[in-house]
Amino acid sequence: MKIEPRMRGFICLTAHPDGAAQSVKNQIEYVKSKGAIANGPQKVLVIGASTGFGLASRITAAFGNNAATIGVFFEKAPTEGKTASPGWYNSAAFEKEAHAAGLYAKSINGDAFSKEIKQQTIDLIKADLGQVDLIVYSLASPVRQHPETGVLHRSVLKPIGDAYHNKTVDFHTGKVSEVSIQPAGEGDIENTVAVMGGEDWAMWMEALNSAGVLAEGVTTVAYSYIGPSLTEPVYRKGTIGRAKDHLEATAFEIADSLKEINGRAYVSVNKALVTQASSAIPVIPLYISLLYKIMKEKGIHEGTIEQIDRLYRERLYTGNAVPVDDRGRIRIDDWEMRDDVQAEVATLWEKATTDNLSELGDLEGYRKDFYNLFGFDIAGVDYNADANEMVAIESI
């Protein structure tokens, strides 16, 4: 059938399998063009492996170091006449390319927060790989059912204390407007920390360690974000910021638990990029459109694959001690947070209006990246041709 983007607010309800396949191929080619990653990981588990930084992490390990990979994700399979979620098509394309290259790649589709999926993953590692030497934790779910209590926790994006007022943009129309976000209420902080904090990451690592499937010298990394001062009230100092604080504190606890096998645990603070989650956050699309304009002009813009490839090559696997900041975090957001970049963003932020945003910012670049998430607007794909929505993931 012919597949076109169908929007509902900030969500695309369709995904294009051929576009997803081409996007995955493009990312693979980028990693291969950089050559082999010296001392890179050999057997890798990626939790949240189907989109964004998680997908890029899987691609970089596989095609940068011929690593065997297991990916865990929760995606919707296709049905006749109805497309799968984009992560399904991404994962199908990844497995096809990995298998064609002679690489081990298997996937598990289900709720990564659950005990059942953790055990299924452990069983697969034991059966096929024995142990893993890198675990990437890249879940981005807004909801978590706690595996012990059964309570369903929902995260919220809210400031703490006072309401937040600032600019935002509807990236579909380019309209810049004022937005107000009311402060967190009772239970909002706790629920957000329960979903997006470090508890589940710690549960994964404890389960894997207890099962004996962690290799000597194992590394685990989870992803976080800090961002600029203008988004601080609603992001880093809001409910999500509390969750990120918890995630970062958890890294130290995990590192302590891995001492007997000389393991290490890090949080990598990554760059602001267009994701399904960030597109729904007020203020962020406007910030990213201005940021993209500046970083592209300076020749330092990165997408997810460029960012993660640099994380592997210049931080995690240099053969030397991993460079961290004064809070133990890897800072691969260093180019975004450069003083000159942030000063220019702040200047443009004050000037940005509906009338001039197309000149001041890179709203077209933002829109393109958004549609790319769903397999649309990717060069080399014939979107007028019929596409087969019924794509299978080989290992599922």
Image (spheres, grey):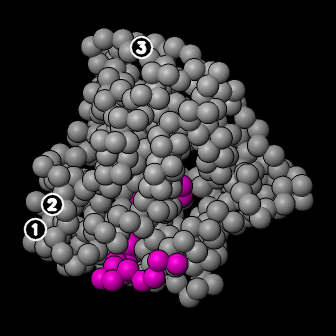
Seen in the picture, residue 323 relative to 194 is either above or below; the reply is: below
Element carrying mark 3: strand
The residue carrying pointer 3 sits among few (fewer than 14), some (14 to 19) or many (20 or more) residues within 10 Å by Cα, namely: some
Q: Identify the main secondary structure in magenta.
A: loop
Mark earlier in primary sequence (3, 1):
3
| Residue 152 visible, this orientation | no
Whole-number angstrom distance, CA of label 2 to CA of label 1: 6 Å
The quarter holding residue 370 reads top right
Q: Which mark is residue 31?
A: none
Instruction: Tell how many labels.
Output: 3
The quadrant of the picture occupied by the C terminus is bottom right
Q: What range is drawn magenta here?
A: 33-52
Contact between labelled residues 1 and 2, with CB atoms less than 8 Å apart: yes
The residue carrying pointer 2 sits among few (fewer than 14), some (14 to 19) or many (20 or more) residues within 10 Å by Cα, namely: some
In percent of the image, x 36 and y 37: which residue is there?
342
Contact between labelled residues 1 and 3, with CB atoms less than 8 Å apart: no
Q: Which mark is residue 255?
A: 2
Q: Where's residue 391, x and y in %?
A: 73, 64
- Three-letter residue code for mark 1: Lys
Residue at which label 3 appears: 165
Q: Is residue 193 magenta?
A: no
Element carrying mark 1: helix
In percent of the image, x 82 and y 50: which residue is there?
3
Element carrying mark 2: helix
- Three-letter residue code for mark 3: His
Seen in the picture, residue 186 relative to 304 is either above or below; the reply is: above
Q: Which mark is residue 259?
A: 1
Q: Where's residue 144, x and y in %?
A: 41, 39
Whole-number angstrom distance, CA of label 3 to CA of label 1: 45 Å
The quadrant of the picture occupied by the N terminus is bottom right
Whole-number angstrom distance, CA of label 2 to CA of label 3: 39 Å
| Residue 32 visible, this orientation | yes
